[in-house]
Amino acid sequence: MSRTDTRTTAAGEVVYEGSSLELQDLTLAYGDVEVVRNVSLTVAPGTTTCVIGPSGSGKSTLLRGINRLHEPKSGDVCLAGRSVLNDKPDDLRLRIGMVFQHFNLFPDHTALENVALAPWRVKGQSKSAAHGLAEDRLREVGLGERMDHRPRDLSGGQQQRVAIARALAMHPEVMLFDEATSSLDPELVKGVLRLMAELCERGMTMVVVTHEMGFARKVADQVVFMDEGEVVEAGTPEQIFDDPQSDRLQTFLSEVL
Amino acid sequence: MDFFENLSQTFLDFEAMAEVFPHLLGTGLVNTIVLSIAATIIGIVAGMVLAVMGISPLRWIRTPARVYTDIFRGLPEILTILLIGQGFYRISAELFGPSPYPLGILALSLISSAYIGEIFRSGIQSVEKGQLEACRALGMSYGKAMALVVIPQGVRRVLPALVNQFISIVKASSLVYFLGLMVGERELFRVGQDAAVLTGNLSPLVLAGMFYLVITVPLTHLVNYFDHKFRNGRRKPTGPTSGLKEVTELESTETAGAAR
């Protein structure tokens, strides 16, 4: 199966082919301190899993363990049914897109160059092919008019959408969102969430660390509640939000809802 | 009155100045610039290597860079220049002939690379961690991420400090005269000093000093101008905008690109 072409439906809509993702007893540590302990999680292809929980609960570290920005201490990560811990990290990261809380766009590159850089310099596509690809991705996220802007001439919401386009341009099988809307002004959050919901609808596999409970309830196929480095509860949005079992989840929900 | 006349005789003997001017311009200035630019170019290349080594996660790469920097930053310039210039004279004479320039440039480069390495390192380390992380998340290797994204940003931030260092090299280049220069090899200071011995007053040295200032002062202002431009330029001024428009920004493309 070639992943270099973007598939589209008859209506011209881009279709993604998300892969399955499975975490088995994943443990991540800073030195001797285990910040994520024995997390097991199955994400079916094309589904969205939202990870919620209080700050310091290890949500972000968990995400970084998936693409090995933080090397797991023990456990396993399986992508499309195969363990990836013996792969080269760079090869693994080609298959997993990541979006950060603070965007992390390259400030001296235009929106277009931000998106085109990795296809050009990492995947070895020709510069013009990479730019063409970047144009398509930017149009998809509603920034066709702003391709030549540098990040600081874009709003936070626009920057985050460039960051999403940048990740999509690598044709990832899984997308990771690390509090993607947490540093946005309130009126800009909606545009980014809507884009994320749309990716979900089009078949992308996503793991979303978020504080947006409305988004988790509406879009997620599975919600995972983490506290103190462990998965306390996991289930459908209805189970988690309407029928929380553990005290900790009940307390958490009463604080945020 | 006698006092002031004495002063002006010592420092502002225009006749003596006029006499030495062609030599300062034709010999001294040229040689000073050749020495300084050569040492700066080598210093920048070596400094970049030192900086990249210095931020390596691997200790056996980091430590040699640290030791090198500590040594050449910690020694007096004159001592380094004499040790290198006289100590390796024989080898240099065989390779390049009797001129003390190659070793002078080498010594100046060793000194400047230690400083420039630290300048680059501070610039590169001031780039937000998220930049490297974003690159790695896109599948870039550490080396590519540094070369394409992190280092260019870091270097741009330290341009003024780099010019500072060039100015420092221009001044230090005068110390090469300790290695003994032929007439045509003399740099600004030596030309001025030789003339001062002949005229019996300090006016030629005052003029040499002016030459130094002519190199260094405009450069400082020029780099500040470019630094300012780098930071604020290339920016399209936009009018006031509304964040509310962004919610519909996506919808307008949905209808164009995809049916809902």
Image (cartoon, rainbow, N blue to C red):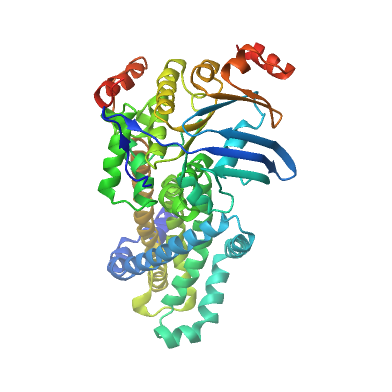
Residue A174 vs B206, above or below: the answer is above
Residue A56 lies, in percent from the top left, at: 66, 29
User: In the displayed structure, does residue B57 sit left or right of residue A136?
Assistant: right
In the image, residue A44 lies at what x, y percent? Answer: 52, 33
Residue A204 image point, x, y percent: 44, 32
Considering depth in this image, is B232 or B254 the residue closer to the camera?
B254
Seen at 57% across and 70% down, the residue is B79
Quarter occupied by residue A144: top left
Q: Residue at x 48, y 20 (%)?
A: A219
Q: Nearer the viewer, residue B39 or A183?
A: A183
Q: Residue at x 62, y 31 (%)?
A: A59
Question: Does B13 sit above or below residue B123?
Answer: below
Within the image, what quadrant is residue A41 found in?
top right
- Residue A69 seen: no
Position of residue B37 measured from the top left corner of the image (x, y, whole percent): 38, 64
In this rendering, would B156 be left or right of A228?
A: left
Residue at image coords 38%, 54%: B216
Instruction: Tell me if I can see residue A113 in this picture.
Output: yes
Most foreground residue, A49 or B63: A49
